[in-house]
Image (cartoon, rainbow, N blue to C red):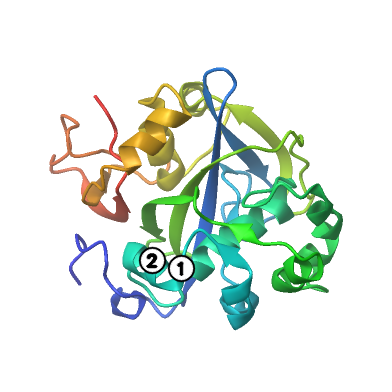
């Protein structure tokens, strides 16, 4: 396997018989007044990254790929989504990221219709599909301001593996994050620098995709700078790892990027970390 190929198909990734599931992560950012990100603490009994601080996200569900979404989406065609991610059912990754953000932290993305939050419990327990919620309320999801910034594949060795696309979006809702009490036990806004400081001091536990994302965002002053950078269409950069949770991931311009004690992650980003 070419570990440096950012577009490698999921079925071509080396596996240890643990299925690699497609998944999405949503990074909500806002100027408060400094650039801050929405994060949450995962339940200590969770089956994946328990007791870690992460961003909202989860696996793609069948309904996220439902043909009904063709009539419920604005701002991004299926063809445009496929060109950006180069994977099947590409637009479902945007939909899943929005749905998971509603389920886990009770924050809307892609719509400002707060009544959608009334359906949150039904989405969480699976008694309603997200497409039916949007259709039933005669709404649309606007995907135009939700941008992919990275792709991460869980390494071998664990009981779960995901092929996850990370998205960034601005939070326009005044709703205070409310955790679901199941997957998420605490949600909060924080600057990337403060989050990294808390990781360094041992107050937070994080894995390399989260740490890499915080390192990227730490180099931007505000939301506008992040989205301006994404307009430049940078080529994907491979991120290198020293340790999955105990050392900061490395970007190409970092001093020790090609040191012998590092290895290429199954992680690529097209939001550059600025000097």
Given residues 182 and 33, the one toward you in this image is 33
Q: Nearer the viewer, residue 16 or 113?
A: 113
What x and y, as percent, mark residue 66?
61, 80
Does any portion of residue 246 appear in the rendered image?
no
Disc marking residue 77: 1
Task: Give the residue drawn at x 26%, y 38%.
Answer: 250
Q: Is residue 103 above or below residue 29?
A: below
Q: Residues within 10 Å of mark 1 (few under 14, many from 20)?
A: some
Kindly check if marks 1 and 2 are in contact, taking CB atoms under 8 A apart as contact.
yes
How dense is the environment of label 2, judged by Cα within 10 Å: few (below 14), some, or many (20 and up)? few
Is 13 placed left or right of 49 in the picture? left
The answer to whether residue 227 is above or below residue 133 is above
Closer-to-camera residue (28/266): 28
Distance from Cα at disc 1 to Cα at disc 2: 5 Å
Along the horizontal axis of the image, is 121 left or right of 36?
right
Q: Nearer the viewer, residue 251 or 19?
A: 251
Residue 119 seen in this snapshot? yes
Q: Secondary structure at mark 2?
A: helix
Query: Which quadrant, please, contains the C terminus?
Result: top left
> How many labels sit on residues?
2
Quick check: 233 above or below 18?
A: above
Q: Position of residue 188 (x, y in %)?
A: 67, 32
Determine the image quadrant of residue 185.
Answer: top right
| Residue 9 appears left or right of 47 | left
The label number, if any, that marks residue 23 in the structure image: none
Circle 2 sits on which residue? 80
Position of residue 174 in the picture relative to residue 260 (left or right) = right
Could you tell me residue 205's position as x and y percent? 54, 37
Where is residue 16? Give x, y as percent. 38, 76
As helix, strand or loop, the secondary structure at mark 1 comes to loop
């Amino acid at each position: 396997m070419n570990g440096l190929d950012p577009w490698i198909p999921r079925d071509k990734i080396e596996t240890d018989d643990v299925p690699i599931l497609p998944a999405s992560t949503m990074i909500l950012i806002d100027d408060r007044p400094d650039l801050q990100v929405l994060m949450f603490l995962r339940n200590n009994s969770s089956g994946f990254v328990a007791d870690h601080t992460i961003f909202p996200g989860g696996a793609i569900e069948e309904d996220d790929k439902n043909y009904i979404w063709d009539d419920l989406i604005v701002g991004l065609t299926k063809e445009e989504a496929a060109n950006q991610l180069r994977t099947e059912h590409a637009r479902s990754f945007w939909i899943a990221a929005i749905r998971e953000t509603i389920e886990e932290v009770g924050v809307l993305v892609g719509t400002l219709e707060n009544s959608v939050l009334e359906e949150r419990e039904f989405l969480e327990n699976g008694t309603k599909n997200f497409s039916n919620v949007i259709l039933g309320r005669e709404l649309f999801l606007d995907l135009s301001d939700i941008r992919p910034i990275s792709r991460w594949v869980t390494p071998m060795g664990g009981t779960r593996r995901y092929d996850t696309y990370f998205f960034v979006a601005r939070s326009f809702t005044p709703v205070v994050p409310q955790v679901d009490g199941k997957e998420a036990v605490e949600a909060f806004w924080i600057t990337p620098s403060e989050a990294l400081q808390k990781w360094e001091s041992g107050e937070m536990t994080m894995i390399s995709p989260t740490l890499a994302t915080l390192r990227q965002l730490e180099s931007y002053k505000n939301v506008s700078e992040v989205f301006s950078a994404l307009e430049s269409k940078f080529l994907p950069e491979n991120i290198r790892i020293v340790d999955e949770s105990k050392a900061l991931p490395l970007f190409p311009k970092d001093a020790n990027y090609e040191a012998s004690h590092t290895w290429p992650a199954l992680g690529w980003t097209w939001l550059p970390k600025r000097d």
